[in-house]
Amino acid sequence: TENNYAPVVPSGWPSPVYDFTGNEVSYDKFMLGRHLFYEPMLSLDSTVSCASCHLQTFGFTNGPSHAVSHGVNSLLGKRNSPALFNLTWQPKIMWDGGVNNIENQPIGPIQNPVEMNLSFGNALARIAASPKYKALFKNAYGDTVVTSARFLKSFAQFMGLMVSYNSKYDKVKNGDDTFTASENNGYTIFKNKCSSCHSEPLFSDYMFRNNGLPVNSYQDSGRYRITLNSSDIFRFKTPSLRNLAYTAPYMHDGRFSTLSQVLSHYEAG
């Protein structure tokens, strides 16, 4: 309904980094952001939208059909499209942490030459000229004026309200379900072996690490390209383990297609 679009902070979770202060949530703003997320007009040749690389079916990743993202003219990126959920808890967004505010995040892929390859100014101009978006902006903001702030704030509402918090794990923690013996064994192993990086309840501490993956042909330096600090070479953000059943392939470059391969890397890699 139009009345249940308030931000969610599940019981026992830390406070979000981004709390929608100055960006009051509404159904119409959320729906404007959703339309923009699925809008191919935001790419140079009007063939690629955000949803092209963040498919809902696969937890808003690029899915198992290819390891890294595909942009305009079928150009290949260097990285697997990260899953989009619980973004308001992330102090830094993207694999290298190059964005520190969810409101600024769309600018990067829109302007990236191998993703959507359109200047942000031209993207705003296209939206402003569209009768469809004149109506959507009027619904959301009371008039048809398209500004960068309105564009980005509505985007933030759509992305920021994707909250993963009702899994079986969450139900167990809330006392509404119980793990099977096998699940409980797995949880014990996880707490002993994995939780120092994939900390509960978000299943990531969102820090940047080099986890020993062999360097691939992309020569992606990771966090280093943002900080230029040599200690950050080949460090990437620790992803959340939520929704793993849907978000293959795994790692920043999508090199592993199965969870068994991921576990083998940590066991022997």
Image (cartoon, helix red, strand yellow):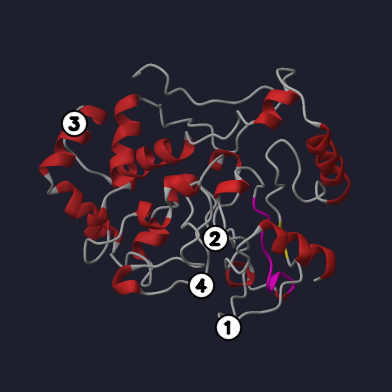
Is there any visible trace of residue 150 in the rendered image? no
Q: On the picture, is 209 further left or further right than 97?
A: right
Q: CA distance from mark 3 to mark 2?
A: 32 Å
Task: Tell me residue 247's x, y (percent).
Answer: 55, 52
How would you rate the neighbour count of disc 4 (Cα within 10 Å): few for under 14, some for 14-19, many for 20 or more?
some
Residue holding disc 3: 138
User: Sequence order check: which comes first, mark 1 or mark 3?
Assistant: 3
Q: Amino acid at mark 3?
A: Lys
Quadrant for residue 5, please give it: top left
Q: Which residues are magenta?
A: 231-239
Outermost front residue: 181
Task: Tell me residue 2's x, y (percent).
Answer: 34, 19
Residue 98, labelled with which disc?
Answer: 2
Q: Amino acid at mark 1?
A: Ser
Q: Residue at x 52, y 63 (%)?
A: 80
Residue holding disc 1: 217
In the image, 260 versus 90, the foreground residue is 260
Q: Amino acid at mark 2?
A: Gly
User: Sequence order check: which comes first, mark 1 or mark 2?
Assistant: 2
Residue 97 falls inside the magenta stretch: no
Q: Are marks 1 and 3 in contact (CB under 8 Å)?
A: no
Q: Amino acid at mark 4?
A: Lys
Q: CA distance from mark 3 to mark 4?
A: 38 Å
Residue 78, labelled with which disc?
Answer: 4
Please, is residue 109 above or below residue 5 in the view? Answer: below
Quadrant for residue 112, please give it: bottom left
Outermost bottom residue: 217
Q: Are marks 1 and 2 in contact (CB under 8 Å)?
A: no
In the image, 50 versus 269, the foreground residue is 269
Task: Tell me residue 24's x, y (percent).
Answer: 40, 27
Q: CA distance from mark 1 to mark 2?
A: 22 Å
**Element at badge 1?**
loop
